[in-house]
Image (spheres, rainbow, N blue to C red):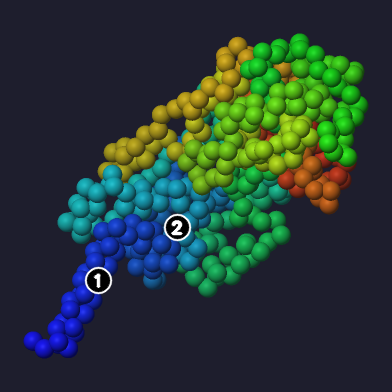
Amino acid sequence: MNGPLRKVSIFVALMMAALLVNVTWISVVRTDELNADPRNRRVRDAEFASDRGAILVGNTPIAVTNPAEGSFPFVRTYPNGPTWSSVTGWYSYDYARSELERQYNEELSGTGASQTINRVIDTLVGRTRQGADLTTTLNPAAQAAAVEALGNNQGAAIAMNWESGEILALASTPTYDPNRLSTLDLTQARANWEELLNAPSEPLKNRAVREVFPPGSTFKLVTAAAALENGMLPSTELEAPQSLQLPNSSRSMGNSTNCGGATVTLEQALVTSCNTAFGTLGMELGAEQLRATAEDFGFNSPSLIDLPSSPSRFPTELDEAQTALSAIGQFDVAASPLQMLQVAAAIANDGRMMRPYLVRTVTGADLRVVRSVEPRELGSPLTEANAQLMQQMMESVVTDGTGRPAQVDGMTIGGKTGTAQSDPDRPPYAWFVGYAQDPQVAVVAFVQSADVERDDISGGRIAAPIFTAILEALR
């Protein structure tokens, strides 16, 4: 063989080797990635030709697959869709999926590893692939109460059994109808998507778990817990000036309530939500201790709820002024409603923080339970003794302090209000987070934007009634 032919042969051999390596790489290494790519129309076509599993509350479906005519044999429908949209999410040909539809897509579509045997049997007998059903922990009365109480406000509410971590209600408002995106009229679905995506109220945002906001005075629960963990008591006295000059800053911190004196106890500071006392306390504890306690409660870590979610943030490298502001939930502190719910739930549960979860069981088409979820403890951000001291103080907030609007006859309730300033050009956020002892429920209510005057916005006035409406539904 002469030289030129030899070179051509080597070049062709190398190209063939490269092609084989690339095919092997795609077939073995990138299979899952390519199958999950929402642009892969073959995978989408196969999914839409399968009998997707239902999402259930008890025995009632909140997402179900029905027979259809036309390009696909099945269509996804959502009975009472707006009530449950924050939980189910949407399932759309062009716009993929969200919430439980996204998190449990493999199980619902029947493509999960645990469903391999069922898929083989379906193929052998020529049967359409069937997905697994999800049975949730949700309570229909609590969910309906949360959605109704929030109304058209931009906001969120979550209720959780603080002993087990079971989510009983999870709502983000304004809601939307996921049927508008699951329709097989793809032209109409695209028009609906554009309308929902560009709506000023941003209904497609899940404010309960995927958005973070300044928590305001609800964060004082974390600061108070840090104080107790560092040897202080509810009776420990704190300086509470009318105005606190922030170190090395031209700014000062003021109070929106009457703290009750120039010196107050830790419990009194929480009851009256005294900013200057907590600002002073934050500087005394120091940024590192505040951050450590916040991280024990779950800040700066991914949330482990079985929904797509965003981590809450406590800032690093704080100076004294920034530490004082962070101690009252301002500066760069940002929390999801779920995060503040976990703080209250851990306190109610004597310091034990449970993993929040929505899906109790995954059941295959053969009625065999593919997976069941058991309560799981995530950690203990404070001791049992200190948690009980926090309960004492939070119950005083409701009986004697800013949380009075959250009182419910016949229930022992602990809570904390929050009114968070985010921008001088927009109204503050309103928060209420707390718990009841019987039933064993923790609830967070958050209002991002309400149609009321700015001066009328506060956690007690706006968020506490949402809290009580959910508790009443769970009696």
The residue that appears at 56% across and 50% down in the rendered structure is: 85
| Quadrant in the picture for residue 463 | top right
The residue that appears at 57% across and 16% down in the rendered structure is: 383
Looking at the image, can residue 373 be seen? yes
Q: Viewer-nearest of labels 1 and 2?
A: 1
256 is higher (above) or lower (below) than 422: above
Q: Residues within 10 Å of mark 2 (few under 14, many from 20)?
A: many
- The image shows residue 376 at horizontal and vertical percentages of 44, 27
Residue bearing the label numbered 1: 18
Left or right position of 469 against 169: right
- The image shows residue 442 at horizontal and vertical percentages of 61, 28
Q: Nearer the viewer, residue 219 or 7?
A: 7
Residue type marked 1: Ala
Q: N-terminal of the two: label 1 or label 2?
A: 1
Left or right position of 358 against 5: right
208 is higher (above) or lower (below) than 416: below
- The image shows residue 204 at horizontal and vertical percentages of 60, 55
For the residue labelled by badge 1, is the local secondary structure a helix, a strand or a loop?
helix
Residue type marked 2: Arg
Please give the label number shown on residue 263. Answer: none
Q: Nearer the viewer, residue 53 or 273?
A: 273
The residue that appears at 49% across and 38% down in the rendered structure is: 304
Residue bearing the label numbered 2: 76
Q: In the rendered image, which quarter contains the N terminus? A: bottom left
| Quadrant in the picture for residue 310 | top right
Q: Nearer the viewer, residue 96 or 295?
A: 295
234 is higher (above) or lower (below) than 257: above
Q: Nearer the viewer, residue 103 or 83?
A: 103
CA distance separating discs 1 and 2 = 43 Å
Q: In the rendered image, which quarter contains the C terminus? A: top right
